[in-house]
Image: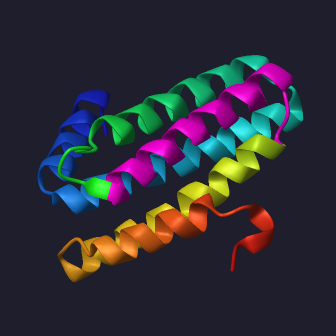
Amino acid sequence: MTQQGLNAYRRTEVQSRTPLELVVMLYDGALRFTVLAHDAVLRRDIRARHDATSRLLGIISELQNTLDLERGGEVAASLDGLYDYMARRVLEATSRNDAAPLADVRRLLETLRDAWLTLSRTGGIDPALVADAARVAAAPMEQRP
């Protein structure tokens, strides 16, 4: 398949998704780049780490920019705080060349992605489910289920 054909396929795939499925796709991308960044840190591959963390931060920023803080209430505020925290952890991993903060970000992303996937499959936003996922993700590591 040519690059042009691949780009057309990707556009069609994105255009045919519901907003909730698009959020899940963003989380999938964030998880993919988190793993790539983590592996690059372990290999001490600065270029690969930079590329992966740049894309990861872009996705986190996009997730944060889609929040409606006025209408989203406590859930949106919690997610906003989590996205800030994740961005700081990614930057910490980069500045220290340390994989541990990326492992933390991955756990948070996985928890939130699972909640959004459930929402996309049920066809609606259940604020309680998202709030619970945000609460679990934000809990200190020793208090997580």
Q: Main secondary structure of the magenta part?
A: helix
Q: Position of residue 106 (x, y in %)?
A: 64, 53
Q: Position of residue 76 (x, y in %)?
A: 33, 52
In the rendered image of this protein, does residue 87 appear above or below residue 103?
above
The answer to if 132 sits in the magenta stretch is no
In percent of the image, x 43 and y 51: which residue is there?
79
Colouring scheme, one of rainbow, by chain, secondary structure, one colour: rainbow
Image quarter in which the N terminus is found = top left
Q: Position of residue 60 (x, y in %)?
A: 46, 38
Task: Say whether residue 131 is left or right of residue 41.
Answer: left
In percent of the image, x 53 and y 66: which residue is there?
135
The one nearer the camera, 70 or 125, is 70
The one nearer the camera, 72 or 114, is 72
Q: Position of residue 103 (x, y in %)?
A: 74, 51
Which range of residues does the magenta coloring cover? 74-99
Image quarter in which the C terminus is found = bottom right
In percent of the image, x 18 and y 76: which residue is there?
123
The one nearer the camera, 141 or 6, is 141
In percent of the image, x 23 and y 82: which residue is there?
122
The answer to if 96 sits in the magenta stretch is yes
- Residue 72 location, quadrant: bottom left
